[in-house]
Image (cartoon, rainbow, N blue to C red):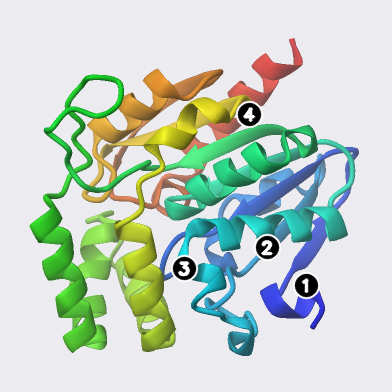
Amino acid sequence: MSVQVRNSVHVSGSGAATMVFSHGFGCDQTMWRFMAPAYRERFRVITYDLTGSGRSDLSAYDPERYGTLHGYADDLLEIVDAFATGPVILVGHSVSSMIGMLATIKAPERFAAQVMVAPSACYINDRRNDRAGEDYIGGFEREDIEELLETMDANYLGWSSSLAPAIMGAPERPDLREELTESFCRNDPTIARHFARVTFLSDHRPDLPLSTTPALILQCSDDLIAPMSAGDYLHRHLPRSVLHVIDNIGHCPHMSAPTASTRAIDAFLAELRH
């Protein structure tokens, strides 16, 4: 199976460098439509669906390969090798920010920069002191995550309908809340449940110091999934990182605050060129 078919890869635009957009849990590449077009005149733009999501080939989903985020990072590297030209800038939303970071660790020579949109290295609070000797607040207790996953296992559509609007936030944009709900509900429930477990139980704090690719952390001011403490932690432990806080309610600023997101990315890239 070709990489293009497996991940429904779409290439547009032109430029000496490539910008790759990777979506978050429950989403697909169409959710980059508010931002990706702004870069097509300057970059070769790649959008794709994570294996098991969107229009990807669901038959390619292997629970063992995708039992950790490393499987998705390997997919991303295959896409970069097949379609990217010149320096590569990764733009990853939510869990894809960690997928992208893992790719930069595996092949740092392929990447010029990474943009992390609403990222979290670990969703579970750790008050036993992490390796750096500090409490970590990821936003959820372990029991909260287990209950969330159990609810998802019992009633995926009901879980999606109740949680997706809260994840989107954007109280003034009911259309976006409805869109994310529909996106969640379109996913294969078995794959989505497995991906959710891999996502919400992951802990990539130990990997942060290993990624030396310049990084922009786009943090939302009010985010149910990735609180300010998660962004602050990333900034402290991720080398060569810049933290930019967007005034936004919700976990999807690339949809609910695309102009602010694009401006922050442009400023970050301009600084890199100096």
Q: In what element is the residue under mark 1?
A: helix
Q: Amino acid at mark 1?
A: Val
User: Dot 3 corresponds to which residue?
Assistant: 67
Amino acid at circle 2: Asp
Kindly check if marks 1 and 2 are in contact, taking CB atoms under 8 A apart as contact.
Answer: yes
> Quick one: label 1, few (<14), some, or many (20+) residues within 10 Å?
some
Residue 166's quadrant in the figure? bottom left
Q: Which residue is mark 2?
A: 75
- Answer above or below: position of 108 versus 28: above
Q: Who's the residue at 17% across and 87% down the image?
A: 154
The reply to whether discs 2 and 4 touch (Cβ–Cβ < 8 Å) is no
The numbered mark, 3 or 2, whose residue comes first in the sequence reads 3
Residue picked out by circle 4: 266
Res. 232 image quadrant? top left
Which label number is shown at residue 158? Answer: none
- In terms of sequence position, does the residue under pointer 1 or pointer 3 come before the other? 1
Q: Is residue 62 above or below residue 73?
A: below
